[in-house]
Amino acid sequence: MTHERAARWAVLVAWLAGALFLAAAFMLAVVITIHAQDALTFGEWSRLISQHWHLHYDAATAQEYGRPLYYVLQGWIWGVFGFHEALGRTLSGLFSVLLLVSLVALLRGRPWGGLAAALGVLALVSMPVYAAQAVSGLTDIPAAALVALAGAILWRGRPGLAGAIVLAVTCALAMLAKPSALLALAGLALAQLLVDESWRSRLLYRVVPIAGGVGLGLVYDAVQAHDVGQGLRTFLQAGVNTAYYRALAEESRPYALLDGAWFGDGLRVAAFFAIVYTVLRLAGLRHRFCVAAGVPAAVLVSWLGPWLAAHRSDGTVGTLHSTGAALAALGTALFLCAGVFGFRDAVAERRELLQLAVWAIPTAVAWLLYGAYDFRLLAPGWPPLLGLIVLAALPAATAFARRGALVAAVPAALFAIVVAENAYNLDGLGKSGWSQLRRTKDWLDRDETRAIVLPAFSRALVVVRREMRPGDDMVSTEGAFRFFYPGHVEQSYPNNCRFLRRFRVFVLTTDEGSRRYMRDFLHVPPEPSYWAACQQPHLTQLTSGSEGYAVFRIQD
């Protein structure tokens, strides 16, 4: 009990860091506009729902219909309270809180549960990808939050009848949040087969509710797939299984696998250690040997993997890319080494490590195959992966608690510094964005704060607004315009001049990704000069495209 009281200081530091981090996120939710590209693109559906109070529109695509939970809720909120972007971003932030709370609940049900939960809080709020997505208005965190909640319900013991019903509803909501929750829930169901209970209990109270919730979600998906004229598999894979994204994933896969920055630089060593530690433990080796072998292996791989991935001639990559990264890696390694002296009851059982691994594997494999170009797409796998990181590090944390309250608080305080540094990544602002925000005179001026996060787009939007009249339509390869002109923007890549006749404005994106897609997959010239030469209809180029957007006025 004395040691657990000492650990409370570390828990207090962790919760304070997490609370301050989320407070900053909600502040940004109020003062910064929606600016994530997909949040703007899919947010058109929310705007149409708020205006007309039904779900089906010609402008909506299979990708929107596959993510109804967040965007329908956002539309209803805007319909009731009026269109305010801050309300949508606050809703996004609430799902981020749900993810944190669910992760805590997942980790608490064990000896040293409070300390494990504190480690989970620090791990989550130290992730740059979590910081960037916390109030973004995207659906990755809502899906992860509901998957984590389902896991928390199961990890706290066998649910009764009421618990099984809540579990089924949670799984159905996770499916409605984003189709990528499917594999995470499948992994969670497989993990329940390893629980030390009777087969009847495992099936009736664990596997069947998950299957029921997934089934309800799939019924919705099947209905929507039929309505848009697609097969169920095509509908579930909308946006990730096109030729372009398959090529992008294949190109990114070696780097994403070897670099190890899935949770950011601050957790690179801890993530590699958790993998090595879990594999060695499942191979039957003792905890102390796994720590003694895992720490140096993790330190080596956290440099060697990024070096192999980057094909650099020098060694300034991974844990050695900067002095700060090297110090963070050294501090993490020293902390993890203390696991040799941790309390025996803090060492996770092999069965639980195996359950978490089984839960994580389907999502991790699918991410490597289809989504390796973006770490946020791994979000449904965060709960079990962070669980493995925490359980691998928990014995080390108890070893510090053995030495008293002050010593127990030291590593938590040092890690809180990593969290504070990660606050710069909130909402994707970075240090330059925070600096611009501090210099902004009116934080509630939407156009001014939008220019901080979307400078080039904001300037293009000003030009578009001058050209668009009520009832006019526009076409653009940039889906964000759909948010500002709901129902009047076709997001597509034109393949000839004649295609543009029925529009008033054409905005061509000139970033390298768009140019590559048009050149390599559509075999259409991506240069603004080609489109400026169109005569039927006649196009007048209004912006050069040097900032990423070439705006054209169309006159037939």
Image: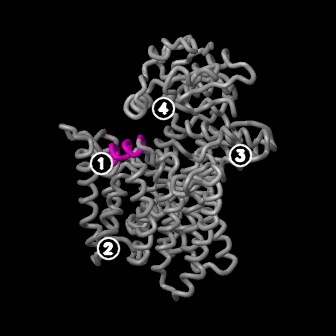
| Lower position in the chain sequence, tag 2 or tag 3 | 3
Compared with 54, 536 (above or below) is above
List x then y, in percent, for residue 87. 71, 42
Q: Is residue 527 visible?
A: yes
Number of numbered discs: 4
Q: Residue at x 60, y 62 (%)?
A: 218
Which one is nearer the viewer's eye here, 512 or 35? 512
Q: Which residues are magenta?
A: 244-253
2 or 3: mark nearer the eye: 3
- The Cα atoms of the two marked residues, 3 and 1, are separated by 40 Å
Label 1 neighbour load within 10 Å: few <14, some 14-19, many 20+: some
Label 3 neighbour load within 10 Å: few <14, some 14-19, many 20+: some
Q: Residue at x 46, y 45 (%)?
A: 128
Residue ID for mark 4 = 431
3 or 1: mark nearer the eye: 3
Q: Residue at x 58, y 71 (%)?
A: 210
Please, what secondary structure does the residue beneath circle 2 have?
A: helix
List x then y, in percent, for residue 386. 45, 60
List x then y, in percent, for residue 523. 40, 29
Q: Amino acid at mark 1?
A: Pro
Residue ID for mark 2 = 281
4 or 1: mark nearer the eye: 1
Q: Amino acid at mark 4?
A: Lys
Q: Residue at x 38, y 53 (%)?
A: 369
Residue ID for mark 3 = 56
Q: Amino acid at mark 3?
A: His
Compared with 230, 166 (above or below) is below
Please, what secondary structure does the residue beneath circle 1 have?
A: helix
4 or 2: mark nearer the eye: 2
Q: Quadrant of the C terminus?
A: top right
The disc label shown at residue 254, or none = 1
